[in-house]
Amino acid sequence: MQNVKFVRWVALLAFGEGWHNNHHAFEYSARHGLEWWQLDMTWYVVRFLQAVGLATEVKLPTESQKQRMAFSSDTITT
């Protein structure tokens, strides 16, 4: 995740799609912006739907999964 280039202005205009590489790292995740500073408007919609009971079984990567992915991407440098 750390070696990937994210486009912040695309994330703002495209409701979080600027963090799309996070989706490739964690395909099952409902949230593309995995860090607190990564704005992901789609995630806020999913959270709202979850709060009103329309979205269930929402999946996110655990902290240990994110750390493992960060470690593996650090070891795969070109």
Image: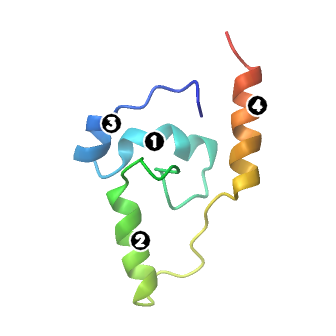
Is there CB contact under 8 Å for labels 4 and 3?
A: no
Name the residue that disc number 3 marks.
Answer: 8
Q: Residue 75: percent from the left, percent from the top?
A: 77, 22
67 versus 28 height, above or below: above
Name the residue nearer the viewer: 45 or 36: 36
4 versus 29 height, above or below: above
Instruction: Tell me which label, 1 or 3, sits earlier in the chain.
Output: 3
Q: Residue 4: percent from the left, percent from the top?
A: 53, 27
Report, in whole angstroms, how far the alpha carbon at label 1 lies from the one at label 3. Answer: 11 Å
Residue reaching furthest to the top: 78
Residue drawn where x is 66% and y is 57% of the image: 61
Point out the frontmost of discs 2 and 3: 3
Report, in whole angstroms, how far the alpha carbon at label 4 lies from the one at label 1. Answer: 18 Å
Residue drawn where x is 60% and y is 51% of the image: 27
Name the residue that disc number 1 marks.
Answer: 20
| Badge 4 density bin: few <14, some 14–19, many ≥20, Cα 10 Å | few
Name the residue that disc number 2 marks.
Answer: 46
Helix, strand or loop under label 1: helix
Name the residue that disc number 4 marks.
Answer: 72
Amino acid type at circle 1 is His
Report, in whole angstroms, how far the alpha carbon at label 2 lies from the one at label 3. Answer: 20 Å
Residue reaching furthest to the left: 13
Residue drawn where x is 36% and y is 51% of the image: 39
Instruction: Tell me which label, 4 or 1, sits earlier in the chain.
Output: 1
Report, in whole angstroms, how far the alpha carbon at label 4 lies from the one at label 3. Answer: 24 Å
Amino acid type at circle 3 is Arg
Helix, strand or loop under label 2: helix
Residue drawn where x is 51% and y is 62% of the image: 30
Point out the frontmost of discs 4 and 1: 4
Report, in whole angstroms, how far the alpha carbon at label 2 lies from the one at label 1. Answer: 16 Å
Name the residue nearer the viewer: 20 or 40: 40
